[in-house]
Amino acid sequence: MELITERLILRPWQESDAESLYKYAKDPKVGPIAGWPVHTSVDNSREIIREVLSAEETYAVCLKENGKAVGSIGLMKGTASNLNLPDTEGEIGYWIGVPYWGQGLIPEAVKELLRHGFEDLKLDKIWCGYFEGNTKSKRVQEKCGFTYHHTNKDIYWKLMDDIRTEHVSCISREGWYQIND
């Protein structure tokens, strides 16, 4: 399935995206603050496409102008989430390559995934978190209508083998309809 916005195509990851993924995911400014290690090679990126990014409701964020993958966004439903949610709720995660920071592309992608989650998947609530210090991710959530819910302090984050503080926000279907009416 593809989701289309004004400037983006959100589509399933393909192994042929490995070079583009590596180009952006090797940057230490991207992965670690989002909770995952930098990619070490094109082969490493290809493996991550096969093992992680091939999950249901996970999309390459592609520019309409050239079809290139420049980021990723996913909606993890129920127990697939990091937050142990019921099946009627989901969690959005996202990142985008540094050259595309500050252009409003991820808020555009998040808004489309919210629409998809509430209208197509009939979810009741969608959650989103960011780690302490990730002010860009916090700002995306504010722009998209999420409201702060709670903070998880001193949690062990297995992917990075460290201790972090995570701030969690959410938006209900009703709240989403109110701001999109």
Image (cartoon, rainbow, N blue to C red):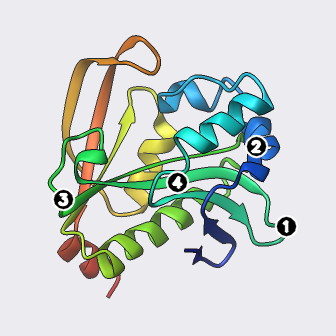
Task: Inspect the image, locate mark 2, and give the three-letter code of the amino acid beneath it.
Answer: Ala
Residue that carries the numbered disc 4 in the rendered image = 73
Q: Residue at x 40, y 63 (%)?
A: 144
Mark 3 or mark 2, earlier in chain: 2
The numbered mark, 3 or 1, whose residue comes first in the sequence reads 1
Q: Closer to the N terminus: mark 2 or mark 1?
A: 2
- The correct choice, above or below, for 171 with respect to 45 in the image is below
Give the farthest residue toward the right.
66
Crowd class of label 3 (few under 14; some 14 to 19; many from 20; radius 10 Å): some
Residue at mark 1:
66
Q: Which residue is labeled 3 in the image? A: 87
Labels 4 & 3 near each other (Cβ < 8 A): no
Horizontal side of 96 relative to 16 (left or right) equals: left
Q: Secondary structure at mark 3?
A: loop
Give the spatial CA distance, label 2 vs label 4.
16 Å
Question: Percent position (x, y) of residue 153?
Answer: 22, 21
The amino acid pointed to by label 4 is Ile
Q: Are marks 2 and 4 in contact (CB under 8 Å)?
A: no
Q: Residues within 10 Å of mark 1 (few under 14, many from 20)?
A: few
**Residue at image location 65% in from the left, 27% down from the top:** 29
Label pair 3/1, CB-CB below 8 angstroms:
no
Which label was assigned to residue 77? none
**Foreground of the two, 50 or 123:** 50
Real-space Cα distance between discs 3 and 1? 36 Å
Give the quadrant of the C terminus: bottom left
Give the side of residue 144 with respect to residue 16, left or right: left
As measured in the structure, the alpha-carbon distance from the residue carrying label 2 to the one carrying label 1 is 16 Å
Report the residue marked by disc 2.
Answer: 18
Q: Earlier in the sequence, mark 2 or mark 4?
A: 2
Q: What's the amino acid at mark 3? A: Asp
Disc 2 element: helix
